[in-house]
Amino acid sequence: MRGATAPAGRALPLVAATALLAGGCGGGSGAGAGAEGEPADGRTFTTAYASDPGGLDPAKTVMSIAIGINRYLYDPLIHLGDKGEPVAGLAQKWQATLKTATFTLRPGLTCSDGSKLTASDVAANIDYIGDPKNKSPLAGVLIQPGTTAEADDGQRTVTLTSGAPDAFLLRNAGSVPIACGNGLKDRTVLAKGGKGSGTGMFTMTESVANDHYTLTRREDYSWGPSGQGAKGLPDKVTIRVIPNETTAANLLLSGELNAAAISGPEQKRPAARELFHADVQAPLGQLYFNQSGTRPAADETVRRALVQALNLSDVGKVITNGTGKPSQGLVTDEPRACTGDSVTGNLPPHDLTAAKSALDAAGWVPGSGGIRTKNGKKLTLSLMYGTQNGPSMAAGAELIQKEWQSLGAEVTLKPADSPALNSTLFGSGNWDVSMGPIALTAPNQLVPFMDGPTPPKGLNFSGVDNPEYAALVRKASAQVGTAGCPRWQQAETALIKHLNVVPYYNSLTPVFGTSARFEVSQGTIVPSSIRMYAD
């Protein structure tokens, strides 16, 4: 689940595709940024990620941290500009409808092992995701199941036929990270960083799980959105796994890190030094309920009581350290395909008394120790939250635990890093409530997570069954692009009204830089935008 995107790999444990799409950036600078001097060549850009990425196969992950690393290694067919317009990537020309899209590749593209990138290689990437037997988590998010692609290597064209109508086919299919070389024959190569199989500006030269990843800039790379050949580009990138934000802030201030996203209270220190920063809006405050089988939250009455018991504004302020703002929808990453407010007025207001009365009426009565029971079963809940989100997320989880205990629930906190959260949601299924958010730039990227089969056959990890949402999705999917946005907003509203998902707060996380400047889009640093400066 960006996926979509985490601010420099820190804020989002689960991302629906959006980490592959472009977003906005912002920032400021100060003396500590080292940006007043001249750009410096031959430098290593060192940045921090709060968790190990796990497997790096770009067709087998929706984890934001893995996507952030893969952005250095693989390029998409198109990029998106600040307003959502398509910008040339591996493709120089394109056209698309609801069902078909054709991309013409730039001439002279190569894999990181020096071999030629062909249209057949690109088609193989699309076919792999579109084939249901491969169980790619990008199926239904970027590529519809059943999608096939035909290649003309002589003309450098790839034509795909979508397995289902896709209102945002161009931006979705165009955002698939393209691998090539031996990685297409042996995907274990891609899982370890795709040595020789990349299409991006950098190639993986060293990886030590849970410690660091070293990337080296390709000398033959001559495409991309901008920047190749510019002065100040780093020769190498080192990504360090640093779970503790205090440590990350210390290393940033000492100059041992050139970039780090600081979402917790530690951000006050680099801000006081007036370091350069690029800010990322992310959907940090979201709740997902396990609605499968006999789980307590399978009952909408229970979900409603749990939400009513929470002062979501207070929780949001805690998890964002007071720097965030209330959510207006599930599509948050810029550039958004659709805008609007599907949240305001559709979540129940904070009312603990009403929540208790609702549970009483539903047969959940207080028992021993104040824990509610129904038919001899206790109201017990496990609450998962991402450790990579810093101490503020733990504090938010503790606040939710306290308020639900006041309601009469027995709540166990389950901290988890990104791979563990992913494994639980899409593997064991042993969870009740998750605070792991999903980042989106287009509303149809949410569909496989909110409709259809549950894991391991699909991505509907919450077990959502909302016929109104499904019907509105079908209508919205029949309209190209933004023409269907009103229908998409109605579909999203149907989910929120029934509390299938609860978006309540967005964060604004600064990605600080010292002796370097960069742009941030889709929640991650844009590799071609990095510029190193003399100390």
Image: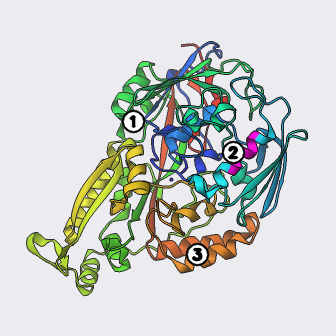
Q: Measured from the top left, where is residue 105 in percent x and y?
A: 83, 39
Point out the residue furthest to the right here: 155
Q: Which residue is drawn at 42% across and 41% down?
A: 263
Q: Distance between the residues labelled 1 and 3?
A: 44 Å
Local SS, label 3: helix
| Residue 126 highlighted magenta (yes or no) | yes
Local SS, label 1: helix
Q: Could you say which quadrant of the image residue 38 lies in?
A: top right
Q: Residue at x 35, y 70 (%)?
A: 307
Q: Measured from the top left, where is residue 433 in percent x and y?
A: 35, 62
Q: Measured from the top left, where is residue 390 in percent x and y?
A: 36, 42
Which amino acid type is marked by label 3? Answer: Ala
Local SS, label 2: helix
Which amino acid type is marked by label 1? Answer: Lys
- First in residue order: circle 1 vs circle 3: 1
Q: In this view, does 260 lie above or below 495?
A: above
Q: Say which residue label 2 marks.
A: 125
Other-residue count near label 1 (Cα within 10 Å), few / some / many at <14 / 14–19 / ≥20: few
Nearer to the camera, 330 or 367: 367
Query: What is the magenta range?
Result: 121-127
Q: Distance between the residues labelled 2 and 3?
A: 28 Å
Q: Are marks 2 and 1 in contact (CB under 8 Å)?
A: no
Left or right of 214, for residue 147? right
How many dots with numbers? 3
* Label at residue 470: 3
Q: Say which residue label 1 marks.
A: 268
Q: How far apart are marks 2 and 1 (CA)?
A: 43 Å
Left or right of 317, for residue 449? right
Q: Which of marks 2 and 1 is in front?
A: 2
Left or right of 508, for residue 299? left
Nearer to the camera, 5 or 293: 293
Q: Are marks 2 and 3 in contact (CB under 8 Å)?
A: no
